[in-house]
Amino acid sequence: MAKIIFKKPEALTDKQNHYCPGCTHGVIHRLVAEVIDDMGIRDNTVGVCPVGCSVFAYDYFNVDMFQASHGRAPAVATGIKRCLPDRMVFTYQGDGDLASIGSAEIVHAAARGEKISTIFVNNAIYGMTGGQMAPTTLPVRRQPPAPGVEIGN
């Protein structure tokens, strides 16, 4: 009899992931799902995913999921948690959503001591809109031009 040493977590659906090659969303989904399974809370968990690449989390997590407006996942999660205090409520947010338009939402939720968990996916770009800089994109130190090289306007 073969011993199973690796399998898909029950907290993940069978849907094939669509994320860009090299993106960490798939890995993070698996890690979150493994924790949900290990804690035995799949039937008692509610996730909230906002606009951006993370919006598709509802397709991949085998738990109750809500969608929220851009940056507003902490507010939606707060409402869910207050209505269903026995549930484990988490938000799954990208850097553009959480560190940009939603920064005030998460700061205020933390200041109020809301009993929610937030998964912050920081890939340092706005991936869904073509890869422009995000609030978490690291600055690049530019080298000065070589001697005798002019840079035009």
Image (spheres, rainbow, N blue to C red):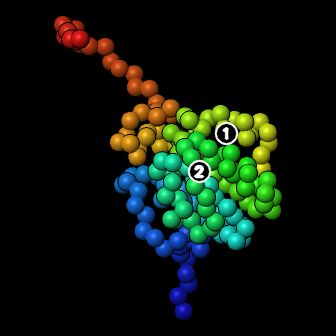
Q: Label 1: few (<14), some or many (≥20) within 10 Å?
A: some
Residue 24 in percent (x, y) is at 47, 52
- Residue 106 numbered mark, or none: 1
Quadrant of the frame with the C terminus: top left
Drawn side of residue 36 relative to residue 146, left or right: right
Residue 91 in percent (x, y) is at 63, 52
Type of amino acid under label 1: Ile
- Residue 68 numbered mark, or none: 2
Could you say whether the residue bearing mark 1 is in a helix, strand or loop?
A: helix
Q: Residue at x 78, y 57 (%)?
A: 83
Q: Residue at x 40, y 61 (%)?
A: 18
Q: Residue at x 72, y 36 (%)?
A: 108
Drawn side of residue 20 relative to residue 150, left or right: right
Q: Residue furthest bottom?
A: 1
Could you say whether the residue bearing mark 2 is in a helix, strand or loop?
A: loop
Q: Choose between 73 and 107: the one closer to the eye.
A: 73
Q: Is residue 116 visible?
A: no
Q: Nearer the viewer, mark 2 or mark 1?
A: 2
Drawn side of residue 119 relative to residue 25, left or right: right
Q: Residue at x 21, y 11 (%)?
A: 152
Quadrant of the frame with the N terminus: bottom right
